[in-house]
Image (spheres, helix red, strand yellow):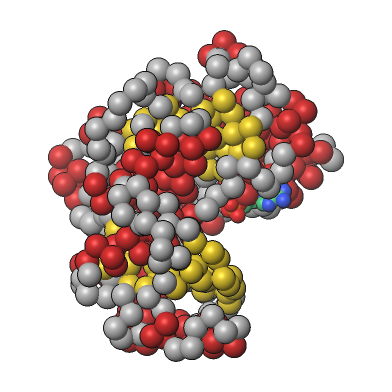
């Protein structure tokens, strides 16, 4: 079974092709053995139709597929939809594109490319099942108190609430950390989550705080494999400082800068989504490596940017340590979390009082790979788990297709 995962940006198209062994179970809890056969992509894409043709051409030349008929499904990591979440067929269910368009103002960099791209896939590959896995899907069971903003009812009714993002990444962490902690029951629960919902559990609760730290960052609290809350809110412009997008911001800031700096709303939005985050704080760049290099050379703004990022991450870890009454594991994932021992060490500094101690040598030795970095006496294990969002999308795509057939 060949599943293509398409990652669509406003001017980019990235893809991965997975092959699943039909002999392995994908049913409730089944892991589904998959091999990634191909990975590629194009920048400066102006026509997704052409990109789809190019992608199929590459896969054909490499001998992975002969025609579109050899693709058993295409999965999309869609961000958020109006009144819609979960894992849904995007070729036969018109609600998917409508829901993406319905919230294009909340995720202007993400929703329009997916709505357009999925439409082009429908035209180019008729008969090939298309599946949308919303990033918000992992947060379907978050308690209402953690999803509500204290806004007038009409705002809430219009959709102003916390949704949460990076769902595929945090779901993978939930599954893999359960395996690393010897809780196969919880790993099975996570894999079956979008089909079966939160099934009953036995044994001690498994509490995980997952830190997805990358170009875009979030911290999520997970109990027994199910999210109980996250740092991201209505939009991906919330929570931790992002690469060039503002994180949490007092709502009074927007009218204040409009009045005092004379900025029109569109310009405020542009600056919050393009000139804020690590870039806005440091003035150096939006890549953590550049910010770190500048800080090492004595750039004070770059140092502040790192300190704000570390402080904000600790703030959200603390929130979920309280919600979960401690944690069995703290996990680092994504580009920053996987590759920066110094940032991990700063985030974990002086947390022995809440049961968290990092092993300096193990931490320094681990970059870009899975492993445990906690000290021997740490009550909470600390892991690095490389992000594997595309595998989650591929598996859910296959499950969705299998369930419908
Ligand atoms: P992501 O969005 O997960 O690709 O993460 C991007 C962020 O991860 C950028 O801020 C990079 O600075 C950081 N990053 C990626 N690779 C490395 C690396 N090898 N060493 C240090 N930082 C890295």
Which residue is depicted at the point 45% across and 19% down? 326
- Image coordinates of residue 73 in percent, x first then y, are 37, 73
- Image coordinates of residue 139 in percent, x first then y, are 32, 43
In the picture, the quarter occupied by the N terminus is bottom left
Count of numbered labels shown in the rendering:
0
Near-viewer residue (373 or 334): 373
Q: In the displayed orientation, state which residue is furthest to the top.
A: 353
Vertical position of residue 10 compared to residue 361: above or below? below
Q: In the displayed orientation, state which residue is furthest to the right.
A: 297
Residue 144 placement, left or right of 261 = left
Asked whether residue 74 appears in the rendered view, the answer is yes
Vertical position of residue 361 compared to residue 1: above or below? above
Near-viewer residue (86 or 67): 67
Residue 230: image quadrant is: top left
Which residue is depicted at the point 57% across and 84% down? 63
Which residue is depicted at the point 26% across and 51% down? 195
Which residue is depicted at the point 29% across and 30% down? 201
- Image coordinates of residue 35 in percent, x first then y, are 54, 64
- Image coordinates of residue 134 in percent, x first then y, are 34, 57
Residue 77: image quadrant is: bottom left
Residue 231 placement, left or right of 365 = left
């Amino acid at each position: 079974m060949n599943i293509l995962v398409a990652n669509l940006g406003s001017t980019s198209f990235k893809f991965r092709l997975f092959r699943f062994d039909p002999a392995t179970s994908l049913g409730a809890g089944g892991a589904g053995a998959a091999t990634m056969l191909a990975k590629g992509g194009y920048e400066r894409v102006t026509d997704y139709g052409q990109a789809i043709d190019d992608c199929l051409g590459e896969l054909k030349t490499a001998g992975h597929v002969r025609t579109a008929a050899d693709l058993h499904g295409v999965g999309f990591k869609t961000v958020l939809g109006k009144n819609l979440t979960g894992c849904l067929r995007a070729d036969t269910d018109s609600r998917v594109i409508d829901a993406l368009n319905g919230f294009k103002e909340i995720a202007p960099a993400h929703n329009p490319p997916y709505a357009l791209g999925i439409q082009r896939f429908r035209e180019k590959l008729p008969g090939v099942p298309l599946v949308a896995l919303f990033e918000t899907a992992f947060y379907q069971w978050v308690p209402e108190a953690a999803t509500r903003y204290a806004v007038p009812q009409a705002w809430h009714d219009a959709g102003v609430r916390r949704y949460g993002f990076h769902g595929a990444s945090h779901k993978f962490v939930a599954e893999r950390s359960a395996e690393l902690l010897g809780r196969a029951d919880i790993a099975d629960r996570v894999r079956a989550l979008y089909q079966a919902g939160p099934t009953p559990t036995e044994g001690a609760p498994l509490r995980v705080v997952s830190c997805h730290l990358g170009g875009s960052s979030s911290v999520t609290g997970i109990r027994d494999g199910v999210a109980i809350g996250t740092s991201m809110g209505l939009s991906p412009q919330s929570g931790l400082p992002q690469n060039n997008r503002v994180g949490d911001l007092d709502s009074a800031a927007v009218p204040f800068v409009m009045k005092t700096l004379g900025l029109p709303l569109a310009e405020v939005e542009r600056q919050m989504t393009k000139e804020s985050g690590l870039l806005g704080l440091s003035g150096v760049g939006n890549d953590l490596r550049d910010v770190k290099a500048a800080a090492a050379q004595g750039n004070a703004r770059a140092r502040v940017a790192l300190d704000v990022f570390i402080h904000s991450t600790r703030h959200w870890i603390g929130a979920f340590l309280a919600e979960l009454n401690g944690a069995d594991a703290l996990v680092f994932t994504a580009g920053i979390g996987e590759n920066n021992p110094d940032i991990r060490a700063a985030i974990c500094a002086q947390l022995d009082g809440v049961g968290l101690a990092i092993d300096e040598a193990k931490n320094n030795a681990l970059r870009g790979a899975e492993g445990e970095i906690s000290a021997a006496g740490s009550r909470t294990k600390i892991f690095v788990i490389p992000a594997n969002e595309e595998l989650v999308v591929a598996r859910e795509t296959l499950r969705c297709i299998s369930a419908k057939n």
